[in-house]
Image: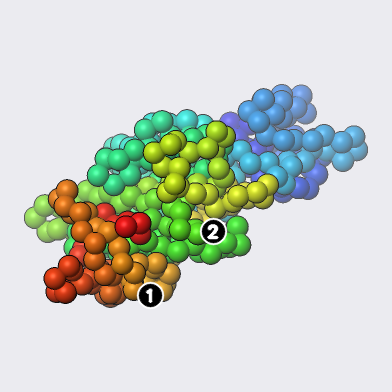
Amino acid sequence: MSTKSRLLELLEQEKGSYLSGEMLAEKLQVSRTAGWKAIQNLRQEGYEIQAVTNKGYVLDKESDVLSAEAIRCGLEHPEVTVQVFREIPSTSLAMKQMALEGGVPHGSVVAANEQTRGKGRKGRKFYSPKDSGLYLSVLLYPQKTVKESLELTAEAAVAVCRAVEECCKISLGIKWVNDLYLEEKKVCGILTEAVTDFETGDIEFAVIGIGLNLKLPKGGFPEEIQEKAGAVLTGEEVVDRNRLAATIVNELLKETEKKGIPQEYIRRNLVPGRTICIVQENRRRVVKAKEILPDGRLRICNEQGQEELLSGADVSLEL
């Protein structure tokens, strides 16, 4: 780990508290001049580090630069791999490549401030502008089969809801299968991708991609999603994205140790009891959503008054 990375880790651990230059130099085992140069480099990267004579250096509590060091500080299992990028085509693509190369621990994270080719279900583009969201992918080696893959999406949805509630004090709803909503607008998408053993059906590894809109982007959302997309925060509220990312990972690892669809996923779901629009194989239908079953499937009543069970479909709350 470089001097700059070790310095940032120390500042993140004591965020909001002053650390003397002498103490930092001693802990880092470098000269005070080398420590000062590392401070300057961090400032150039956007970290708000103040210096006060006879007190030392302090990382501003509201500093919101994503970093591997800050995320790791909040992880319950910090021994995992954590990579953070200012800009990347796709966090999930990067994580899949790492997993295929091998040696990456369960619970490892790739996060980014911006994605240039973020994607959702069925290859759709997920708008991921800089400085307004949290985009991360988590690697899992779940003890599940491909038939249980819906559990992973449900567990991820619950993990994000809990993390947002803890860090932002805001309660989100879940739209079956994989979207999180606030006041009838989508604020988060979840994409679960897995590599499976063809013979056994066991999941070898899964990558959970999470795109969370925290603030409205500068200039607003693109016209095609303006009416559907929203953000968790609508004013000048500040949230620590590093803490939020770590909390999401912690909650996800706890949930994926369990079996079955979480009851919280069913309880938070916005779909049961509503008339919804579903699209399957390019066919659009308006149906009545009845309930989510313990295995995650959605029971609906179709246009003919007959019941059907869905394990996957595009669902819209707008008719």
Q: Is residue 242 above or below residue 313?
A: above
Which mark is on residue 198? Answer: none
Q: Is residue 203 something one can see in this rendering? A: no
- Quarter-wise, where is residue 216 in the image? top right
- Quarter-wise, where is residue 127 in the image? top left
Query: 80 or 311, which is in the foreground?
Result: 311
For the rendered model, the colour scheme is rainbow
On the picture, is 177 further left or further right than 214? left
Which mark is on residue 263? Answer: 1
Q: Is residue 78 above or below residue 85?
A: below
Question: Badge 2, how many Cα within 10 Å: few under 14, some, many 20+?
Answer: many
- The image position of residue 168, as x and y in percent, is 60, 57
- The image position of residue 270, as x and y in percent, is 39, 67
Query: 96 or 217, which is in the foreground?
Result: 217
Q: Residue at x 12, y 59 (%)?
A: 200
**Dot 2 corresponds to which residue?**
164
Which quadrant does the N terminus fall into? Answer: top right
On the picture, is 269 further left or further right than 250? left
Q: Residue at x 34, y 73 (%)?
A: 273
Which quadrant does the C terminus fall into? Answer: bottom left
Q: Residue at x 59, y 51 (%)?
A: 233
Q: Is residue 220 something one can see in this rendering? A: yes
Query: 281 or 215, which is in the foreground?
Result: 281
Amino acid type shown at disc 2? Val
Q: Residue at x 37, y 33 (%)?
A: 117
Amino acid type shown at disc 1? Gln
On the picture, is 68 further left or further right than 268? right
Q: Secondary structure at mark 2?
A: helix
